[in-house]
Image (spheres, rainbow, N blue to C red):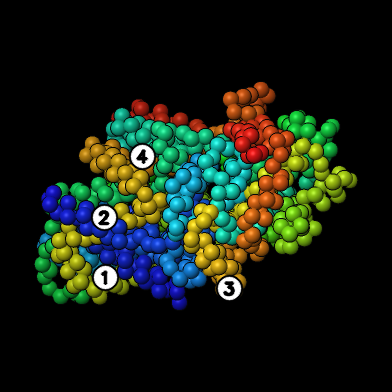
């Protein structure tokens, strides 16, 4: 019963934050960080709560995009293109019908596919040793830097900064590194403060700067009739809906690449698949445009959890936050043994599916209240969110240092947002940095590098041939070749990839 | 915009500052690590018996030293501050540059704990090269592994064992707990090292795993190490004797005993400043908590069922008796040259 109650609380809370313009899943999770300790006695309960938040917030984000024209989060920005014009034409209920059906369909299908099969993906992980992890991390780093941003220079800046932040703390034999004499930094920079600074605070400040007003346009006709029409659109165009889900799922697997990229790719693919003349042109309130991209967001949220669970690499900021909170109540996501734990995968699946279906039902019956929430001035709920973000960050040490670091990172986040420096690239470089360091030295030591005492090292007898042997380490070598390929491709490509800043 | 932003910031800080409370457990680790989780469980249970709110404050840092230093230099003078220390702090007290000093504090309670070492079933200690994943807190475990793999060596000096160690062991630094488990599972590493609760959760009953040895626990009354009641017939000395036909002895063994007891006898411990007026009250509350079946069940679920020690002077005297110049110097040398750790010899510990 506790599981159902917490799944319901998570669903309601995720929906509430999702409805608030600009505040997405990551913000919702930052604000519940300080609840981590509550779930220490039953971490699975916490997992259900968190995944229910993720699922419901992902869906509710879309409703805001459609009803107000302001993205509920960057990951639902593509829904604005056709969703908001539909609302402006008085077809808000029909657009909501599409959003509810599409989110539920893709959310449930991909959650079931992902979480119930997670133990089987886990069989792959046993093939990974130090060299394989090193190769995979190198590949992840190459992906995020050169696929995630158009501007190679800014991408490199983002990666270098992310790597530097990730290296702050201690080296593998516990010597302080990049702490600039500040003892507080000796344990590294935490995920929560980095996410709050890079994403949470800058988005809220942006809302203040834009003086957000988010009332929805008036709706015409009967609400339930409109919803029904939306459901009918989805039934008729299920292929577009499924395509969007598949694209979202695949992009969600790539570290740092998911998010808005999945939505826009899905939207682009829908347009490309409907070259015939449309009754309502794309961009002017075409229901097919909306249903082609809407579910990508939900599928992406699910697949972003796969690299997190398998390798401890969060493919999106929200997944990083889930990992950070779980760490708080003693569950280390990315620990291979968790994949054999049925209760772990069942909790993920239950929370996500409950959240997806729950938010759909709530949205159908609480539509009027959603509109009321959208009428609340931005500064009121932004104040609440800001307070919770500050509180969550002060759970670390409770000292002034927490606030100082949050302020510094928030300033950096604002600069990055202003100059379009890829913040996801910073995040993934940060996560990968520590792991690359660990796997690099681990691989060296495994193959003959010796450190007898501080300052006295030896590479004598290092087994190069054994390490770079295709029969010993095919995964390692393939990853290194792919990473090199991505790097070279990024230098010679004309379109310079997608922009995700 | 700025007026609203300012108002928002003031309100935020107002909400935050109203959320701090009374007794504070200082934890020298980031949230989520073993001792942090233990502290949260203790805080939740202790407040029922102490009758006031108990909150956890994390002060993490390199090798978990800065938090304890801050307690020593500043926070211990607050009457409601309790330090949570773990075994790694005990080893750092011997081998690293630290400010803190256990002899300045009053023991509120310490869990007298153990560590379990495993190997692949059927692996022969006397044969081949062994790959071991290292990490902080591993010092006594790896020293014991060295003795088991190498057996009696010349005069059993640290140099004798270092020679054997370099021939027989590949030491990999900086491997996290989860990856150690994966590495052991896929054969990359030959030794598993876990807390008793984690051993039961991740290894026990799984084919291919073999409990190799445990360190036993301290019998404070007689100041001797006795077998771990949770894992009978697995104590290091007995496993060594059955393998090599004699009890372990020599310099490395003495260094091992020193770091083992300074780690395990205070593996999870609570301290308050000497002369703190609330110490007796908190100590009594801890006694009640230990004797409460619900609270203790929650704690033991995390750590395994191990006895508590609350006799501070006796415990510190027992630990102090292990500190000799030779043992300390040997422990430093072993740490530096076997693991590459930046340990230092501190003659002031002999005073």
Chain holding disc 4: A
Q: Any mark on residue A363, and which?
A: 1
Give the Cα distance between marks 4 and 2.
28 Å
Marked residue nearer the N-terminal end (1 or 4):
1
Q: Write down the residue under mark 4.
A: A426
Q: Write down the chain letter for disc 1.
A: A
Q: CA distance from mark 1 to mark 3?
A: 47 Å
* Chain to which mark 2 belongs: B
Tell me, for residue B292, which label it has, or none: 3
A187 lies left or right of B155: left
Residue A196 sits above or below residue A170 on the image: below
Compare residues B229 and A457 and report the one nearer the observer: B229
Q: Residue at x 40, y 70 (%)?
A: A6
Quadrant position of the C terminus of chain B in the picture: top right
Judged from the image, the secondary structure of the residue bearing numbered disc 1 is helix
Which residue is nearer to you in this view: B71 or A478?
B71
């Amino acid at each position: 019963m506790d599981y159902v109650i917490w799944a319901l609380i998570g669903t309601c809370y995720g929906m509430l934050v999702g409805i608030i313009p600009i505040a997405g899943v990551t913000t919702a999770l930052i604000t519940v960080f300080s609840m981590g300790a509550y779930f220490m006695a039953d971490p699975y309960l916490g997992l259900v709560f968190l995944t229910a938040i993720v699922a419901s917030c992902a869906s509710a984000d879309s409703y805001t995009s459609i009803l107000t024209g302001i993205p509920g989060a960057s990951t639902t920005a593509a829904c604005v293109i056709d969703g908001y014009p539909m609302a402006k034409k008085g077809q808000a209920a029909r657009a909501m019908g599409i959003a509810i059906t599409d989110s539920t369909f893709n959310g449930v299908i991909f959650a079931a596919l992902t979480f119930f099969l997670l133990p089987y993906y886990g069989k792959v992980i046993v093939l990974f040793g130090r060299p394989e992890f090193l190769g995979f991390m190198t590949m992840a780093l190459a992906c995020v830097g050169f696929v995630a941003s158009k501007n190679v220079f800014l991408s490199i800046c983002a990666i270098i900064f992310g790597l530097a932040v990730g290296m702050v703390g201690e080296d593998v034999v516990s010597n302080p590194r990049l702490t600039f004499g500040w003892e507080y930094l000796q344990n590294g920079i935490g995920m929560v403060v980095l996410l709050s600074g890079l994403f949470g605070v800058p988005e809220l400040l942006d809302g203040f700067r834009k003086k957000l007003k988010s009332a929805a346009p008036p709706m015409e006709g009967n609400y339930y009739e409109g919803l029904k029409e939306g459901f009918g659109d989805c039934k008729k165009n299920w292929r577009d809906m499924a395509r969007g889900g598949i694209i979202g799922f695949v992009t969600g697997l790539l570290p740092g690449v998911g998010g808005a990229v999945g939505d826009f790719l899905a939207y682009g693919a829908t347009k490309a698949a409907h070259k015939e003349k449309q009754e309502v042109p794309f961009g002017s309130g075409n229901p097919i445009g909306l249903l082609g991209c809407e579910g990508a967001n939900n599928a992406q949220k699910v697949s972003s959890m796969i690299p997190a669970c398998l390798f401890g690499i969060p493919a999106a900021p929200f997944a990083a936050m889930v990992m950070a909170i779980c760490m708080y109540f003693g569950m280390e996501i990315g620990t291979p043994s968790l994949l054999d734990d049925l209760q772990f995968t069942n909790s993920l699946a239950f929370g996500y599916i409950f959240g997806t279906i729950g938010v759909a039902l709530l949205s159908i019956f609480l539509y009027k209240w959603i509109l009321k929430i959208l009428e609340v001035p931005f500064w009121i709920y932004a104040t609440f969110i800001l307070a919770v973000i500050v509180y969550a960050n002060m759970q670390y040490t409770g000292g002034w240092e927490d606030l100082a670091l949050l302020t510094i990172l928030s300033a950096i986040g604002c600069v990055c947002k202003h100059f379009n420096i890829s913040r996801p690239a910073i995040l993934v470089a940060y996560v990968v940095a520590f792991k690359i360091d660990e796997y690099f030295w681990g691989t060296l030591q495994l193959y003959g590098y010796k450190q007898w005492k501080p300052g006295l090292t030896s590479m004598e007898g290092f087994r190069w041939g054994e390490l770079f042997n295709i029969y010993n380490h095919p995964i390692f070598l393939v990853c290194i070749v792919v990473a090199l390929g991505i790097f070279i491709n990024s230098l010679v490509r004309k379109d310079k990839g997608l922009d995700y800043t | 915009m700025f007026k609203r932003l300012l108002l928002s910031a003031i309100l935020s800080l107002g909400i935050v500052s109203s959320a701090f409370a009374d007794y504070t457990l200082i934890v020298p680790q980031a949230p989520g690590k073993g001792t942090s989780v233990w502290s949260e469980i203790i805080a939740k249970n202790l407040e029922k018996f102490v009758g006031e709110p108990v909150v956890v404050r994390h002060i993490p840092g390199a090798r978990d030293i800065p938090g304890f230093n801050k307690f020593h230099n500043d926070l211990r003078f607050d009457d409601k501050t309790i330090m949570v220390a773990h075994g790694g702090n005990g080893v750092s007290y011997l081998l690293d540059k630290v400010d803190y000093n256990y002899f300045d504090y009053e023991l509120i309670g310490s869990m007298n704990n153990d560590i379990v070492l495993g190997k692949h079933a059927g692996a022969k200690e006397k044969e081949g090269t062994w790959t071991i994943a290292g990490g902080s807190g591993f010092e006594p475990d790896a020293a014991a592994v060295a003795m088991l793999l190498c057996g009696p060596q010349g005069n059993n000096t640290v140099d004798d064992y270092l020679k054997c160690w370099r021939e027989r062991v590949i030491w990999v630094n900086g491997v996290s707990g989860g990856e150690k488990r994966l590495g052991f599972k896929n054969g990359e590493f030959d030794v598993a090292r876990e807390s008793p609760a984690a051993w039961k959760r991740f290894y026990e009953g799984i084919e291919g795993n073999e409990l190799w040895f445990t360190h036993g626990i301290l019998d404070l009354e007689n100041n001797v190490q006795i077998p771990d009641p949770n894992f009978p017939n697995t104590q290091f000395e007995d496993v060594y004797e059955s393998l090599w036909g004699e009890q372990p002895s020599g310099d490395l063994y003495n260094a091992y005993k020193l770091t083992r007891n300074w780690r395990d006898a205070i593996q999870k411990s609570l301290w308050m400043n000497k002369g703190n007026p609330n110490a007796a009250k908190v100590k009594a509350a801890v006694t009640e908590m230990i004797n409460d079946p619900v609270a203790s069940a929650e704690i033991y679920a995390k750590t395994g069922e191990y006895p508590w020690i609350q006799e501070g002077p006796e415990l510190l005297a027992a630990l102090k008796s292990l500190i000799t110049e030779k043992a300390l110097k040997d422990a430093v040398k072993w740490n530096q040259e076997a693991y590459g750790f930046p340990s230092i010899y501190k003659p002031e510990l002999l005073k």
